[in-house]
Amino acid sequence: MNDIQKTTKISTKIDRRILKSFEEKIEAACLRRDSFLNRVLEDELTHLDEEIAGNSPEAQQFIAGRLDQLVRKQVSLALRSDLVERLNDICERKRIVRDAFFNRLFFLLACSSDEINRLFFDGSSEWRYGAEYYDGYRARERLRDHLAPVKDVFWAIRAGLECREEDRIFRLGSEKLAEDYAFHSGLEGLEDINPVERHEKVMRLGREKDAKDGGQFPGGIYSTVWGDPENKKSALFALNCYLPNEMVPDHPDQLALRERAEDLLASLVGD
């Protein structure tokens, strides 16, 4: 047996409501759960590593604490050994709570399109048109080959997020002309080229700028923050793979942010 085919059993604790919904979807689709997860993880681990710049120890500890408040059930998974090694390495390097990742993954695999609208797109469904515009070829591929292997199960969500990100980058290019001329000049003339080629170039420029400015991937499937850390009843908050220090209660960065906000408010009241 090749090394890549070896499996490792690992345990994870999943919120009971999420697990019930996920298992129902798996059964209805006549899928073998662990084989399906192996296929999904081949792509998702790459995205997880790309999206998350890293958590602080305080953020990691806070997410783990919120996760412990959920009513969870222990699940044993038989996953490919190489994927388990990759996942453990990513979680260790970037201080990602592994159970938070699995709970988020199971939730996304089981949730409805309306929940996707609320969690990523402020309740709007317009992102679907953008996803179809940029990545419609994937739908056509599925029509040609109904038994094609599962690949990038969240492609539509990512396409919608990237369409929104493309708009942000163009706006940023206009706003930051004097501050970053090279970034702005790289965007010039892109409106007139093939939309798929334009999208790829715009996203590359945006990623390069984000890396230059601090490295955190904005608005990704795993980097988007769900819930309110001040709301102790928010179960969604425990499903975060990333949390900026400004959102960690009583972290110095959050206290500094509050102080700046109070100073701004005081200056407005003073005027």
Image (cartoon, helix red, strand yellow):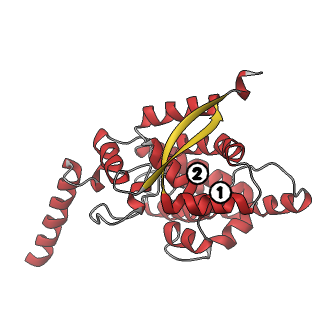
Q: Are marks 2 and 1 in contact (CB under 8 Å)?
A: no
Residue occupying the point 69% across, 26% down: 6
Q: Neighbour class for label 2 at 10 Å: few (<14), some, many (≥20)?
A: few
Q: Earlier in the sequence, mark 2 or mark 1?
A: 1
Q: Neighbour class for label 1 at 10 Å: few (<14), some, many (≥20)?
A: some
Residue corresponding to mark 2: 186
Residue corresponding to mark 1: 154
Choose mark 2 or mark 1, whichever is in front.
Answer: 1
Question: Is residue 188 positioned above or below 58 on the image?
Answer: below
Q: Position of residue 46 (x, y in %)?
A: 60, 40
Residue occupying the point 67% across, 52% down: 200
- Residue 182, can we see it? no
Q: Quadrant of residue 111?
A: bottom right
Asked whether, in this view, residue 190 is left or right of residue 267, the answer is: right
Q: Position of residue 22 (x, y in %)?
A: 61, 59
In whole angstroms, how far apart are the C-alphas of marks 2 and 1? 29 Å
Q: Position of residue 202 (x, y in %)?
A: 61, 54
From the image, which quarter does the C terminus lie in?
bottom left
Question: Is residue 118 positioned above or below 183 on the image?
Answer: below
Question: Is residue 110 positioned above or below 209 on the image?
Answer: below
Secondary element at tag 2: helix
Residue occupying the point 59% across, 56% down: 187
Hey, which residue is sitting farthest right in the picture?
Answer: 144
Q: Quadrant of residue 55?
A: top left
